[in-house]
Image (cartoon, helix red, strand yellow):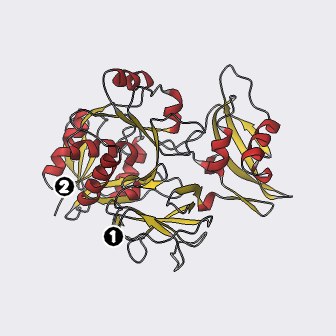
């Protein structure tokens, strides 16, 4: 049986060599985050049970675990923003399909392009940069961590492609890159022409919808609002040859399928619906031309005075205020409205912080009056996962 090899290694050439060696041996890889404290690493190993652990000192120790299955390439722990982290099993076929579809959409030329990997390799957004470079023969510089100066230096030295999260994008001059993949959280309100917004998750092997358009081979449909099941009148769009008709304006659960979508979690739990559709837990809608608009997690909707407000949409509007460096929107109980919209804002240095009335007016003019925050909290930083997503549960 194939081994499941946990890589307890920093990002860099040593990690890439260990990944390649495991794959050459027919084994699967579980990347560990070197930033985690020892108890957290022990908990993850106990939950996902690899059979081998490769350490930063070069040792390879056998542990009491469960082998991988034939065809497994990666076991990646989810970020755990909504629940206990799960081990997503991605097959070699799925990883290759993701690499080829992404590279085709970006028109990657292995002879000319070079990737910069600067996001954590224990998460799919960073790891997919390395795997798509390996599988397409494209050069890739792997940085040990995100560093503004290092990323900008690589761009000046000829790197053409990079993947970032919104917080990193705000701090970096990315004008020299040919293309910048942006994922992990709601994008800022204004984006440069070379920035490509991506929608995806660990279970989809990274982004599978770029700038609202599914990659080749990917299908997207909208299921019943708020539930994890497809319906007969769900709209379906995509590039797989059997697209249906979307329901313009209908908001429901985003469901996806394609060759890069995983088949099950570690230990075999398969959450997919009939026909291989994966219910993402995100709310969205499709336009008649197949463009996907995602509002955020269904579980994160704020219901205020009977109206639904999607935090990600409000965050995108608020992010353009000059006094807002970072923002997170969530809810608190309200005796009058049931729930009230609350904005946690990291003020921009050397700029007057925004007022609540300014933020309310901004949102009311672009979304709706009820979507404006009813409370403003200024903070020094926002609680985030290692992949850059806001931990909304820690705000309130």
Q: Which mark is residue 27?
A: 2
Residue that appears at 37% across and 58% down: 87
Q: x, y percentage for residue 310?
A: 66, 54
Residue 281 left/right relative to 264: right
Residue at the far bottom in the pictured view:
232
Q: Quadrant of residue 121?
A: top left
Q: Is residue 347 visible?
A: yes
Looking at the rendered structure, the secondary structure element under dot 1 is loop
Q: Nearer the viewer, residue 383 or 217?
A: 217
Specify the quadrant that holds the N terminus: bottom left
**Circle 2: is it few (<14), some (14-19), or many (20+) Cα within 10 Å?**
many
In the depicted structure, whether residue 273 falls above or below residue 301: below
* Labelled pair 2, 1 in contact (Cβ < 8 Å): no
Q: x, y percentage for residue 174?
A: 44, 28
Looking at the rendered structure, the secondary structure element under dot 2 is loop
In the depicted structure, whether residue 157 falls above or below residue 240: above
Q: Nearer the viewer, residue 243 or 2?
A: 243
Residue 191 left/right relative to 355: left
> Alpha carbon of mark 2 to alpha carbon of mark 1: how far?
17 Å
Q: x, y percentage for residue 92?
A: 23, 57
**Circle 1: is it few (<14), some (14-19), or many (20+) Cα within 10 Å?**
few
Which mark is first along the chain, 1 or 2?
A: 2
Residue that appears at 39% across and 42% down: 38
Q: Is residue 78 visible?
A: no
Q: Nearer the viewer, residue 115 or 375?
A: 115
Q: Which mark is residue 268?
A: 1
Residue at the far left in the pictured view:
25
Residue that appears at 40% across and 25% down: 176
Residue 208 left/right relative to 289: left
């Amino acid at each position: 049986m194939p081994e499941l090899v946990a890589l307890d290694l920093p990002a860099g050439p040593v990690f890439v060599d260990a990944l390649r060696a495991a794959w050459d041996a027919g084994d699967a890889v579980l990347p560990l985050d070197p930033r985690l404290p020892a108890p957290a690493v022990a908990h993850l190993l106990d939950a996902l049970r690899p059979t081998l652990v490769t350490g930063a000192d070069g040792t390879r120790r056998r542990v009491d675990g469960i082998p991988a299955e034939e065809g497994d390439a990666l076991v990646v722990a989810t970020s755990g923003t909504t629940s206990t982290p799960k081990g997503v099993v991605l097959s070699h076929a799925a990883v290759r399909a993701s690499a080829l579809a992404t590279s085709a959409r970006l028109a990657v030329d292995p002879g000319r392009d070079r990737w910069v990997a600067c996001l954590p390799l224990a998460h799919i957004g960073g790891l997919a940069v390395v795997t798509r470079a390996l599988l397409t023969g494209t050069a890739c510089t792997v940085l040990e961590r995100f560093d503004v100066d290092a990323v900008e230096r690589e761009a000046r030295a000829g790197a053409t492609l990079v993947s970032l999260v919104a917080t990193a994008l705000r701090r970096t001059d990315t004008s020299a890159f040919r293309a910048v993949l942006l994922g992990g959280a709601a994008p800022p309100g204004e984006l440069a022409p070379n920035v490509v917004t991506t929608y995806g998750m660990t279970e989809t092997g990274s982004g599978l919808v770029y700038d609202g358009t599914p990659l080749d081979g990917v299908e997207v449909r909208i299921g019943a609002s708020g539930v994890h099941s497809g319906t007969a009148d769900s709209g379906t769009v995509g590039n797989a040859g059997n697209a249906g008709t979307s329901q313009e304006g209908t908001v429901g659960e985003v469901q996806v399928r394609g060759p890069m979508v995983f088949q099950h979690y570690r230990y075999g739990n398969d959450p997919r619906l009939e026909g291989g559709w994966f219910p993402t837990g995100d709310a969205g809608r499709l336009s008649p031309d197949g463009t996907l608009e995602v509002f955020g997690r269904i579980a994160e909707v704020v219901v205020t005075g009977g109206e639904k407000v999607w935090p990600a949409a409000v965050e995108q509007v608020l992010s353009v205020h000059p006094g807002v460096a970072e923002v997170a929107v969530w809810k608190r109980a309200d005796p009058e409205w049931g729930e009230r919209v609350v904005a946690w804002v990291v003020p921009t240095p050397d700029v007057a912080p925004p007022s609540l009335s300014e933020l309310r007016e901004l949102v009311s003019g672009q979304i709706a009056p009820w979507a404006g925050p009813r409370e403003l909290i200024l903070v020094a930083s926002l609680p985030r996962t290692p992949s850059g997503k806001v931990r909304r549960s820690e705000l309130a």
